[in-house]
Amino acid sequence: MFSDKRMRSPNRLEELFPARALEEEVDRRYARVRARTVQLAAPLSEEDNCVQSMPDASPVKWHLAHTTWFFETFILKRHESGFRPFHRDFEALFNSYYNGIGEQYPRPQRGLLTRPGLADVHAYRRNVDQRVHELLEKRGDDAELRALIVLGAHHEQQHQELILTDIKHLLSLNPLRPAYHAVQAGAAGPATEMKWMAFDGGIVEIGHGGNGFCFDNELPRHKQYLHPYQLASRLITNGEYLEFIDAGGYQTPGLWLSEGWDWVRAQRLSAPLYWRRDDGWSEFTLGGVVPLSPGLPATHISYFEADAYARWQHARLPTEVEWERAAVACKLQGNFADDNLFHPQRAGGRGLQQIFGDAWEWTQSSYAPYPGFRSAAGAIGEYNGKFMVNQYVLRGGSCATPRDHLRVTYRNFFPTSARWQFSGIRLARDN
Amino acid sequence: MFSDKRMRSPNRLEELFPARALEEEVDRRYARVRARTVQLAAPLSEEDNCVQSMPDASPVKWHLAHTTWFFETFILKRHESGFRPFHRDFEALFNSYYNGIGEQYPRPQRGLLTRPGLADVHAYRRNVDQRVHELLEKRGDDAELRALIVLGAHHEQQHQELILTDIKHLLSLNPLRPAYHAVQAGAAGPATEMKWMAFDGGIVEIGHGGNGFCFDNELPRHKQYLHPYQLASRLITNGEYLEFIDAGGYQTPGLWLSEGWDWVRAQRLSAPLYWRRDDGWSEFTLGGVVPLSPGLPATHISYFEADAYARWQHARLPTEVEWERAAVACKLQGNFADDNLFHPQRAGGRGLQQIFGDAWEWTQSSYAPYPGFRSAAGAIGEYNGKFMVNQYVLRGGSCATPRDHLRVTYRNFFPTSARWQFSGIRLARDN
Amino acid sequence: MFSDKRMRSPNRLEELFPARALEEEVDRRYARVRARTVQLAAPLSEEDNCVQSMPDASPVKWHLAHTTWFFETFILKRHESGFRPFHRDFEALFNSYYNGIGEQYPRPQRGLLTRPGLADVHAYRRNVDQRVHELLEKRGDDAELRALIVLGAHHEQQHQELILTDIKHLLSLNPLRPAYHAVQAGAAGPATEMKWMAFDGGIVEIGHGGNGFCFDNELPRHKQYLHPYQLASRLITNGEYLEFIDAGGYQTPGLWLSEGWDWVRAQRLSAPLYWRRDDGWSEFTLGGVVPLSPGLPATHISYFEADAYARWQHARLPTEVEWERAAVACKLQGNFADDNLFHPQRAGGRGLQQIFGDAWEWTQSSYAPYPGFRSAAGAIGEYNGKFMVNQYVLRGGSCATPRDHLRVTYRNFFPTSARWQFSGIRLARDN
Amino acid sequence: MFSDKRMRSPNRLEELFPARALEEEVDRRYARVRARTVQLAAPLSEEDNCVQSMPDASPVKWHLAHTTWFFETFILKRHESGFRPFHRDFEALFNSYYNGIGEQYPRPQRGLLTRPGLADVHAYRRNVDQRVHELLEKRGDDAELRALIVLGAHHEQQHQELILTDIKHLLSLNPLRPAYHAVQAGAAGPATEMKWMAFDGGIVEIGHGGNGFCFDNELPRHKQYLHPYQLASRLITNGEYLEFIDAGGYQTPGLWLSEGWDWVRAQRLSAPLYWRRDDGWSEFTLGGVVPLSPGLPATHISYFEADAYARWQHARLPTEVEWERAAVACKLQGNFADDNLFHPQRAGGRGLQQIFGDAWEWTQSSYAPYPGFRSAAGAIGEYNGKFMVNQYVLRGGSCATPRDHLRVTYRNFFPTSARWQFSGIRLARDN
């Protein structure tokens, strides 16, 4: 039909998920990531592992199986000679959303899968682990294979974070309010004073540029024009967010996006997820219920709430360009899942604080392809691109993110009403 | 306001749930029923025990706990000196629907209760068992106490049936189609020929009249006027129901009640629950998937389907008076839960067959109070009366009913769209 | 399949809807009923005529067209030589629910039919009227034809009542609270004292027995066994119902059927439909908003509310047998649509009052076929039988019922949550 | 709380909606726009004017009243001395979404307002018109007043477009498929050949920059960095879109955004809104049903469909920067509402065709504030900003847009599933 349709050359997987200069051997990384997942699920009973608390969340057991399915389907099935599936029904059962692979078991029913049992899923994990190791011994010099295993390890690290947020949601709905682990969020002292940090505008580059691994949605590195702006030096605290509540924030339509206001009223919301007001305010954490600590970052905040809070402060949320441009100068350190605290900690230090770890930071940027974005061919191409609508970008990782999973160019994304992730608020404003 | 309002005398529990002439000691009955419940749950994993497949069904673990709660709340709390609850949160957590007791944990969320774990619930059972036995030793001659324990044992037997039907529903949704037990429904030979049995009309009495235990909804025994009628000699078989399907029954609006037709179209139904057509027809049973056996009774049929089938046969469903009047002449024997088959068996013998056991039989009688019906005072009074609207009566018990739980006057009831019980069709017509 | 299936002889329409001894010529009745419908719609604008306020209600224009469609489809199409439809699309457009006729326009979308316009629908009415009159002149001695026209006239009278209740619902949702007509419900004095009237039991006969017209659901006349009972001498008043509200009736679960309690909480109900509490209580009527008059009957009450009120009074609702047995001794007179008041009036006189007219009286009887009930063959057979499930019987007519439409054997029926009809409460209790 | 919170100076309305250099006197523009609205509603009956076809659409009568309400509330109430409302209930009744004004009548119930009648609404219009003209005569030199009247006129022009799209939706649901006007979409010849037009990248400026009127969301004019790109020379035609359908586009998940695919399956879609396949394809237009013309632009396309079509073509949708940068060189001419055709016409001419008029063009740009965006103070500030989430920008106007309402910087926006606007597809790709 078109006069000059051009053929697109097939995308090379290694280009879309580059991982040339890894600081660690692929097999060591694989083993480490896989063991950590098992470790995260260890405090949970068979029942905790099995149940699904809402359609957006998945059972922990499902995460254990699905991450394994990823290696079996995208690596063993392609590269193992004489491949035979561990179980013929698992391909459909543990496929999350890859239409290119075939039919999927319906997401809202993942909690119904009492079989296979937890022991069977762990056997599945061990079986696939062994086969991947054998494959790596034989074929470890295959660049695509290595790229796929690194991709699978990062995929599994994403699910490690979901294991923590999904189990937190499930336990929060239990009237017994059980703790996931024994560490309690401390009654922190006051946070540092919030200051405004100014940044220049002009043409900047964002997106992944180096040799290390990244997801396709961080590519290509490209130019954008930036106007001068300011960022808050740290995350908004519980105490600051309480002022918004006390000032009638949840009853003032003028502070909200129209869709946000409808949502607040329909859901009858008056505080962040996991907050409860009895005599005083308390917060459910992975360490159980604790009194709300004013100096800790506010978390489990939706985009709608973050945006309303910012408007109340005559400020706004940053764009992802603004965020990345500022963050690129910071060291990639902070309170991550590796610290085993699983709750944001109070800000300390000077300059831009809490850029990495603690809580994902909502940006006002809709999740969209970068100019020149390309998807991988085949089912792997469904990894990111097909979600680029009606979601907003979060940056910087959280206390549930593995430290070596994150990059300054990393783009997380959720719908505007999502609250069960460790998401918080950093303000921005025009210079 | 009223000129001559009369005081109602308080209802004596022993009168509403009479159990004067029990054939077995109360403590033996208690022990036997409680042990049977544990036995029924034994083949299931912790995960199977925990999950809820739909709002109408409950997790097996919840049944284990709720039946225990019944004894703790209605017996120990009233009669045990120095009563202290096993766990202070269990009163609300395992209250099913007794508003008189207080708030209830929401029914559709019972499956979220991964804690207390299965082991804790079994400990709860053992604790209550011991305290009940001790109480019986001390106070076994208290008529009300004995009546309550017998009521609690019958209540638990009702939940034994639900354990079987609820776990069947859960397992059926698992693509692995796991079996509950190893017994498979046999490929039966043909059923006996269906014959019409004629019965006289006139003034008859129905309802419970003896000394043994009955539920309040079976009282009082009372007169009704009956027109001459006929009953089919046995239940409708799979083969007969298949003829209805093959004749386009699910596509013919004229055969259905208006609400039933809307339901069939909205749910896109074309066969009973658990039937599946691949190459041939198969049926999911508690013994796993088996080829559909034409000679076995059709079961997991809704009222709407039973009514449509009857209309297609130029027949109708019996009223509960017609049913009871005919059944009263039959021996109380049949295929019950005690047989551990958990599936209807083919009809055999002569005369009225399958009146008891195999499958509950839908009647066209709306579930309503008998003339002169009275509820017990207090929360126990919520047992039956408040459900007497928009449900229809089923009679005769099923392959999942404990034999000594049933009586000829027993009234079961479900909404017109319920299909997950072992419910079947016996036809009636005017003489 | 069955050994002795018997053929059912086809039902004769004249038998199922008998109208042998009419007190009025068929053509005069036809003309009178048709003119009355137009008169009832006359106070309404084109817009009022067109809009549908909820799926349960229909636009007045639709009622005008559908009642005409009934005559065109069931009479002209069968009996007119050289029949040609007024408009080829109207057969589907104005078919309410007769699957035997073919597809229907979806009920919840009736309000979208801005075309045909009101003038076109009146033209349709006039056209069909003329053709029916011509047909009657030629074929007026055809018994089936006459039976069908009488049936059609009664059908139209049912829709006359719906015109009033549906337009009341629509106008009530308009913040301007417009009146349908200028007559206001008067500020009545106190009602008569409520007394209990006692009735004997024994074998009684109910159902239509004479030669005049009746609907198929009133047949056959048959015996029932009745226990002695009492009926309240009049309907419950607004003042009496207010006591129930003030006593916390809508906040006390123990007074409600379980399904009713769920409904009250889901709908957040605290008073009958059309009641509003500002400074004092007011009520929306077809004459506009008026202060609530304590002496008038409470109306627009659901079954759930009627049942809860009765339980609060240690009473119950009557069965339809009890009602008919008592009503058969009363004169068929009262406050009907012919009085053009369109609101219940206060009780007066002695003995059983308000049995006919004022407000339909909920019975505790589920809407079910009488023993020996038969439907007509063909689409006309869908008139009543297919609704006999999950609805409850109301008796006695209302202030919106045409007087000569009613009989003592008349059975109206609605679901337990319906409130937009003129439905009220008469108490009963055991003797 | 913050160390250096800065005061925001109040926004001057004239700055946010600038209209300094109007080419026409304000009073003439007012009169012209108001008369055109009445003209557009003239072909419709009272019933057509009253009914609401879905929550997203409004009745035409409501548009007539709400646009009048805008002048009464934002202009007369502020500026008229001795202001008294035309009707005390209209302020709430015809408030669309301005929380700053007070409560609003629920949007999904706008169709229930049979009162005020159409004649009353026209009287309301005439009353407000007269008062606005009198006010302008007295106070015509007040810059804010003039700015508000120009804003109100543009607001009314937006509703003129909605009158056409909303009535089209309503009429399309009527089985009689009535036409709004007599003009039929012609059976067009083939469209021009589609060519790719290349454009340079670099730093560009977009947003409104002149003195004429614009909406606040077009401000401020600002720099963006653009990568080289190509645009299709014209809109996608029906014929081209049919190829997508015939190639199985609606059955191929890999072509769709994940949320789009869920939407297609849930809605069971297989063609654009208003298309129907009987013997051949036809399309419902404001001139009635016509055979689908392959050469005309495809319209009533959702974002999801536009995006899927583009992916099938190995192309993408343009960003709004790309679109505006290319369009700025085109003359503002095309097929607009002024042409009274109310349907897209086939492409003709050379170079970039159909940039203005015919059909709104989806961009891949999420609707977001421009850098430096400010809202007006008070209720007027709710005009645009609060909708900037989960919607996508459309550009270029349509056959239902008044010509002098549009600008090259104009930003329209709708959710990704909206189909009832005249929305179409222009492809883009990287250079």
Image (cartoon, coloured by chain):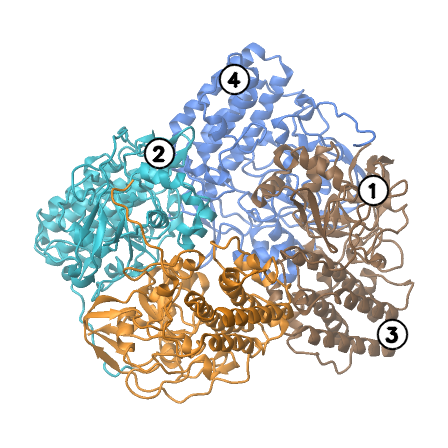
Chain colours: A orange, B brown, C blue, D cyan
Residues at marks 2 and 1, CA–CA distance in whole angstroms: 59 Å
N-terminal of the pair, mark 3 or mark 1, is 3
User: How far is the residue under mark 1 from the one under mark 4?
Assistant: 61 Å
At mark 2, the secondary structure is strand
Q: Chain of mark 4?
A: C
Crowd class of label 2 (few under 14; some 14 to 19; many from 20; radius 10 Å) = some
The relative height of residue C34 versus residue A339 in the rendered view (above or below) is above
Where is mark 1, residue-wise? B189
Same chain under badges 2 and 1? The reply is no
Can you say which quadrant of the picture contains the N terminus of chain B? bottom right
Of marks 4 and 3, the one in the foreground: 3
Depth order, front residue of C360/C338: C360
The residue singled out by tag 3 in the image is B140
What percent of the width, then of the height, locates residue C287? 45, 42
Q: Which residue is mark 4?
A: C132
Which residue lies at the image location 62% right of the left edge and 65% below the top edge? B111
Task: Name the element at disc 4.
Answer: helix
Q: Which is nearer the eye, B204 or D345?
A: D345
Q: Chain of mark 2?
A: D
Q: Quadrant of residue B154?
A: bottom right
> Which is more foreground, mark 2 or mark 1?
1
- Residue D283, disc: 2
User: Are circles 1 and 4 on residues that touch, CB within 8 Å?
Assistant: no
Closer-to-camera residue (D134/B67): B67
Q: Is residue D292 above or below residue C242?
A: above
Q: Amino acid at mark 2?
A: Glu
Q: Nearer the viewer, mark 3 or mark 1?
A: 1
Q: Between label 1 and label 4, give the one nearer the viewer.
A: 1
Q: Are marks 1 and 4 on the same chain?
A: no
Percent coordinates x, y for residue A62 in the rendering = 56, 66
